[in-house]
Amino acid sequence: MSKITCFVCLILFTPIAAQTQETDNWQRKYDSAFTQFPPVIDGMGNELAWQLAPEVGSFTRFQHEDLQPHHQTVAKMLWDNDNLYFLIAVEDPDIWSTMLVRDKECLCREETIELFIDPDGDTNDYAELHFNALDTINDFWVPNNRFVYANGEKVDWDHLYSWTLQGMRHAIINHGTVNDSTDVDQGSVFELALPWSGFGKVAGSANIPPQPGDVWRININRYERPRGAVRSQELSGWAPLKRHSYHVPERFGYVHFIEDDAR
């Protein structure tokens, strides 16, 4: 096991798989526990609630014959009456980012973590959130995966970016030196709190906040790129898409909100 892989395991503590499920086909399912002790959003991920939360399961590479990613990504989720929480750790021997301005350009041009969230699972529209190593974010509304409005007109990206997940909190700790290719880094940890009230029109017919037993469609994706080498990028995701795009809402994972985090 590499030092970087050890880093990912240590950051997210002992893996617990009792409530995460991987089926034999493309479907991914996860039981997200309700927590009575919300985590501090500081990028540390050291609260007991996170230690008890299971991992979502392994990520799968796509747009490539080798489905096993070369760089590990580990993720967990929790929820309470106020927020949906994510803890995502990535191993990365060369952490780099240059983009500093929110909602100006797609962070997917470099290295980024991406969340796709369709609360009511209708596959018609969903939220897309990006986070990079400089704690820059994109948050925008996607009307559908063809990027046209209901009347067939092509989307206006400024309009899509005008949607904001109000009240979102996010923190990142980089275990290494960002934008220094002369050393070997370990990776980064992203910690997020997404308020239910911030989803707005994206929520559609979903309960806000969710009720125990509700299911949302969510995927967690990653762009890993050697510095300046676009063609050798590694694209991976929790729910395997098997297409040339992350925008496959009918294949997002199934996140089931369960009653509590007592185990």
Image: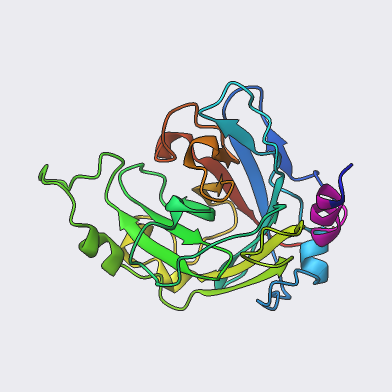
* 193 with respect to 76 (left or right): left
Question: From this viewpoint, is residue 262 visible?
Answer: no
Front-lying residue, 151 or 220 = 220
The answer to whether residue 178 is magenta is: no
Q: Residue at x 19, y 45 (%)?
A: 148
Q: Residue at x 40, y 50 (%)?
A: 120
Judge left or right: residue 11 versus residue 204: right
Residue 13 in the magenta stretch? The answer is yes
In the figure, is residue 226 to the left or right of 189? left
- Residue 236: where, in percent of width, then height? 58, 39
Q: Say which of 10 and 207 sits in front.
A: 10
Residue visible at 41% across and 45% down?
A: 121
193 relative to 61, above or below: below
Residue 146's image quarter?
top left
Residue at the spot x=45%, y=72% of the render? 100
Horizontal and vertical percent position of residue 204: 33, 56
For the residue pair 39 and 128, the one nearer the viewer reads as 128
Q: Where does the image place residue 144, in percent across and percent down from the top left? A: 28, 44
Image quarter of the C terminus: bottom right
Q: Is residue 142 left or right of residue 101?
A: left
Q: Which segment did they paint magenta? A: 4-14
Position in image of residue 190 (x %, y %): 64, 64
Q: Report whether residue 140 is seen.
A: yes
